[in-house]
Structures are given as C-alpha cells and as structure tokens.
Amino acid sequence: MIKIAVIGIGQSLRGDDAAGPEAVRRWREKFPETAGRPEVQIEASELPGLALLDMFNEVDGAILVDAVQSSARPGTIHRLSEAELESFTSDSKSAHGWGVAETLRLRKQLTDAKVNVRIIGIEAEQMGLGAGLSKMIEDAMPGICEALEEEVNNLLK
C-alpha cells in the first residue's frame, strides 16, 4: 500500500504564511473520505526546517502546501515537482528559516529513499505579523483544496 503525507507549512500568526496549514485543514473538511484514508497522513508545521526530513519517514509520497512569494499575482496556485521548486530559490522568500527547497536538497544528499514530492505553492500577498489571510488567499482557497485533492489522488494511483 502506498502511503503519503500531506503537510501544511506556515506560521499561523503571519498573514498569508498560514495559507498552507489552513488549506490542508479546509481540504480535510471538504474531502473527508480522501483525508480519512489510512494511507494518508496529515501533518502541519509552523517552522519545519530540518524537521521536515522526519516527516518523509515511511512515506512513498508527500505533498507540501506552503505560501510562496515570487512575481506572480497573489492567490496564484503553483503546482510543482521537487525539481521545479528550484525556480523559487533565487528571488523568492521563505519565512521558515531553513527553507523547504534547501531541506529537500539536503534530503537528496543524505538519503537515497525515493519519495515522490509535490509542492502546492500559494502566492502570498502579505505575511505581516498578526494579520489574517488576505482576501486574495481566501478567494483562492476553493481552488487550492481542489488542487490538493487532485495531487493526493494522483499520488495514490
């Protein structure tokens, strides 16, 4: 049986940075049958850093849901493979210290475990301390949940 992890990444008190965990929470409510399957493990992490590596233990696939900042319009949904994540390392920013891209690169150096990693990046508008999700992110949430459902089903095939 294939086992996958769905991991929402982001800080709940930093505006749109909370989009990852919030999207996973809403997906779980909207698609309880998929989210409740025994082969799906759901995680949330405010500041994963290197702890993200532990979340890949004993899974065949992982979907990371995280806010990103690039030059795209806020609310844009980026669906990336692990290799495509490299495009977000030069001009983009992470609020998580040791970023997701760096952690995934380190994972490749430390282990030869084959984990199919997909990333759903949600283009953030603001990540101010104490702010809630922006209207652009709220409006994008249904599409983010649909994208997450599709990615989960693709990995479970």
Image (cartoon, rainbow, N blue to C red):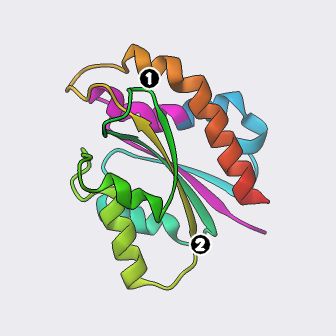
**Residue at x 62% of width, y 41% of height:** 148
Image height of 66 relative to 155, above or below: above
Crowding at label 1, few (<14), some or many (≥20) Cα neighbours within 10 Å? many
Magenta span: 1-23
**Which of disc 2 and disc 1 is earlier in sequence?**
2
**Residue at x 30% of width, y 59% of height:** 49
Query: In the image, which disc is placed on residue 137?
Result: 1
Question: On the rendered structure, is 89 left or right of 156?
Answer: left
Quadrant of the rendered structure where residue 150 is?
A: top right
Residue 79, image x and y in percent?
Answer: 54, 47
Residue 127, image x and y in percent?
Answer: 25, 29
**Residue at x 24% of width, y 44% of height:** 95
Reading the image, the residue beneath label 2 is 58
Question: On the rendered structure, is 55 left or right of 144?
Answer: left
> Which one is closest to the eye, mark 1 or mark 2?
1
In terms of secondary structure, where does tag 1 sit?
Answer: helix
**Residue at x 38% of width, y 26% of height:** 74
Q: What's under tag 2, amino acid-wise?
A: Glu
Q: What's under tag 1, amino acid-wise?
A: Ile
Quadrant assignment for the C terminus: bottom right
The residue closer to the viewer here, 21 or 127, is: 127
The residue closer to the viewer here, 61 or 90, is: 90
**Cα distance between the residues tagged 1 and 2:** 32 Å
Quadrant of the rendered structure where residue 26 is?
A: top right
Quadrant assignment for the N terminus: bottom right
**Does residue 21 show up magenta in the picture?**
yes
